[in-house]
């Protein structure tokens, strides 16, 4: 009975602590990650991202005063460029277009990494209007 328990605990320890990742693992080019080991980063960090949005965002002049948050999502490619920009939850057509226009102006990001490889990462950002 003791030998069976000993083998069980030895086997359980090998499974939990002996994860092996071969060095030749290649990350698929088309896979899009939502969670990474190293998250993508705007050049200069989060503070610079907020400054960029504040400086670039033009409040839509046409129509009534709009207040609220637009949630935009996009993919940060392996080279840091931004693709597939869309509004997940918008306020108005003008506000949504303005958000997409500002995101297209963004410089290249530092891409996300999984197991040391640069990967395509989906990123969602809230953009606030009127507050």
Image (cartoon, grey):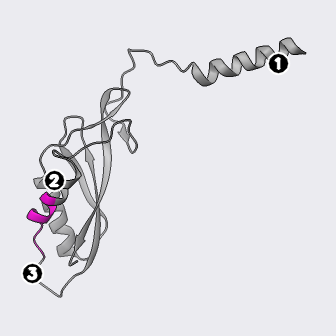
Tell which circle, 1 or 2, labels the residue nearer the N-terminal end: 1
User: Which of the numbered marks, if any, corresponds to residue 48?
Assistant: 2
Q: Residue at x 77, y 19 (%)?
A: 8
Dominant SS in magenta: helix
Q: Is residue 50 magenta?
A: no
Reading the image, the residue beneath label 1 is 5
Q: Secondary structure at mark 1?
A: helix
**Rendered view: 47 above or below 29:** below
Residue 29: x and y in percent read: 31, 31
Between the residue at mark 1 and the residue at mark 2, the CA separation in whole angstroms equals 56 Å
Residue 46: x and y in percent read: 23, 52
Q: Disc 1 vs disc 3: which is toward the camera?
A: 1
Tell which circle, 1 or 3, labels the residue nearer the N-terminal end: 1
Q: Disc 3 vs disc 2: which is toward the camera?
A: 2
**Rendered view: 68 above or below 24:** below
Instruction: From the viewer's perspective, tell me whether residue 131 is left or right of residue 101.
Output: right
Frontmost residue, 82 versus 12: 12
User: Which of the numbered marks, if any, corresponds to residue 61?
Assistant: 3
User: Which of the numbered marks, if any, corresponds to residue 64?
Assistant: none
**Rendered view: 67 above or below 33:** below
Q: Which residues are magenta?
A: 51-59
Residue 74: x and y in percent read: 27, 52
Query: Which quadrant of the view contains residue 128?
Result: bottom left
Between the residue at mark 3 and the residue at mark 2, the CA separation in whole angstroms equals 25 Å
Q: Residue furthest right?
A: 1
């Amino acid at each position: 009975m003791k030998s069976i328990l000993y083998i069980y605990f030895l086997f359980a320890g090998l499974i939990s602590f002996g994860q092996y990742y071969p060095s030749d693992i290649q990350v698929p080019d088309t896979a899009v990650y939502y969670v990474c080991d190293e998250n993508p980063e705007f050049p200069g960090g989060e503070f610079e991202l907020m400054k960029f949005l504040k400086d670039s965002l033009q409040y839509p002049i046409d129509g009534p005063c709009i207040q609220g948050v637009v949630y935009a999502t996009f993919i940060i490619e392996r080279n840091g460029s931004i693709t597939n920009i869309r509004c997940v939850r918008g306020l108005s057509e003008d506000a949504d277009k303005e958000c997409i226009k500002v995101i297209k102006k963004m410089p290249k990001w530092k891409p996300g990494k999984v197991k040391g490889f640069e990967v395509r990462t989906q990123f969602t950002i809230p953009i606030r209007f009127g507050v």
